[in-house]
Amino acid sequence: MMDEVRQPLLLAEDEDTDSDGSSSSVSRKLYSTISAAKPLLHAATCKNGKVVFKKLEGPPSDDGAEKVSEAGLTVYTRRWYVLVMFCLFNATQTAVWSTFGSIAATSEHAFGWNDGTIALLNNWGQICYVIACFVFSWMMDVKGLRAACVSSMFLVALGASVRCISVEPPTVTWTMHLGSILNGLGGPVTMAGPAVLSAVWFPTHERTTATAIGAIMSGLGNGVSFLLGPQIVPLPPANMSSSPLIESRTTVSSVTWTDQSSAVFSNNFTQQYSPDELYIEDQNRIEKERHAIQLLMYIEAAWSIGLFVIMVIYFPKKPPQPPCVSAALQRENFVDGLKQLKARPHFWILVAAYGVATGVNSCWITVLDVILKPFGITEQRAGWIGFYSVCGSIFMALAVARFADKVKRIHKWIVFVFYVICCVAYLIFSLACIEVIPSSTVLLYTTIIVGYVAITSAIPFLYELACELAYPVGEATSNGILTMVNNFTGIIFLLVLMIPNIGTMWTNWTQIGAVACCLPLLLALRERYNRLEVDERLPDMATINIEVVVPAPQDS
């Protein structure tokens, strides 16, 4: 089995020698390799089931002659600038997307929203992702990273700006939804882009690390959102966080409510109010909440616009010379790549294992405030849980990615271990929530953080493994499909959350089931590192004529 999995993809131009010493030609079903961008290696001839590539300085001349370039592989320092800019773009899009997950209670009190409104604002990210996924996957494959990233960042900046128009109902509801839609349309590049960027700019021994950095920065956006939102936006009154706006003095006769963050309710004492006093205090409180939310919108919009301007000024499409051989080889064109993915069963196993588990988790964490609200955990505490979870996942993913870059061919088992840890952590959390086991604040914090760190740390390895299984299909195509399924799962999760009075306890068990059902899929998955084989068998471009033999889909 292992011999078959690690069967070389690169063969010398000489004829193969059989066991009896005689020569024979190799015959194998191959794919055409076409790229919209000018390749550094051009498919010159096709013979005996092999595609022969030659290094080119430019496209073939009119008379068919080929100009051979003497330039070799080059790794540029600017790759880190490109990666940092992509990470900031990724984090910004995610922070704008998850804004209201960290200030849900205040937003409901200030605008008269409910949990369904908060869920829909988050759900626009998934819905618009499915709509725009193929467009931006095509753009990354055909037009390159610059066109895809700059146009996506423009949508994010425009969406953040639209949300600044008004904070007065009912206009605020429409502008917030429109802003979420525009931001969601820019999402496909942030999820499918890390593997594309690492393949274009980074050498083989840094590829998984670069993918991990690019992918995990979406978590940083969540962390910043959970930390920044509650620091700027005040808590609502304790027992009115999800109540509709008080529109008439006569609707309330006498209400007792406590708020430690308000000067009126300082020193933790409770005070009785007349209807007129309660109405005036509530209106003042609502105005403060709206102004605080508007300030948060201004901050996010200003940052988004500034980042967009920087990316317009300088964000290169690709390096002058490739960092590794696989970066120079042409990929399948977008349409043919989509067709050929149908015949790769193990790629679809991976798609299911990624889409179900991470699709639920990515939406579960954005409504963490809503989920923890029944247990008396405030927005600030929920924000710190989210922030610590993100920080832990960043450090874990980077450490394991560096290890994987050195050891190689262990991506599947890294993902499997992370999934097991996540499943156990969330199971303990859910049992504590229903008081089957003793519950405590420390236990809730720990289980959420461990579970989130585990599932998020697995994502970069799933991205890289998808690229290896799909090769020579382009990274944008394979990761676009992968992340589209993830977002489709998220749509279903958030739509169910919008059902009135459904509660939140079901979300915990759904999270456990989503991860647990993926464990058998991972065990059934057969790893194949098609792209890595190319780079290992041809570490440089010293050999002008090479033959690249790609396995047929049924063998992958």
Image (tube, grey):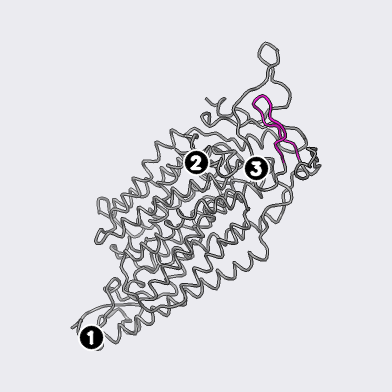
For residue 13, say whether it is visible.
Answer: yes
The answer to whether residue 388 is above or below residue 354 is below
Residue 481 at what x, y percent from top left? 49, 46
Q: Is residue 426 magenta?
A: no
Q: Which residue is mark 1?
A: 249
Q: Are marks 3 and 1 in contact (CB under 8 Å)?
A: no
* Residue found at the far bottom of this picture: 276
Residue nearest the observer in this picture, 515 or 249: 249
- Main secondary-structure element of the magenta-colored stretch: strand
Q: Is residue 44 magenta?
A: yes
Residue 512 screen position, x and y as percent: 34, 47
Residue 91 x, y percent position in the rendering: 53, 61
| Segment tinted magenta in the rendering | 41-55
SS label for mark 1: helix
| Closer to us: 442 or 12 | 12
Location of mark 2 (residue): 414
Q: Can residue 454 be spotted in the picture?
A: no
Circle 3 or circle 2, nearest the eye: 3
Q: Which mark is residue 204?
A: 3
Amino acid type for the residue under numbered disc 2:
Ile
* Label 2 vs label 1, nearer the camera: 1
Q: Secondary structure at mark 2?
A: helix
Q: Residues within 10 Å of mark 2 (few under 14, many from 20)?
A: some
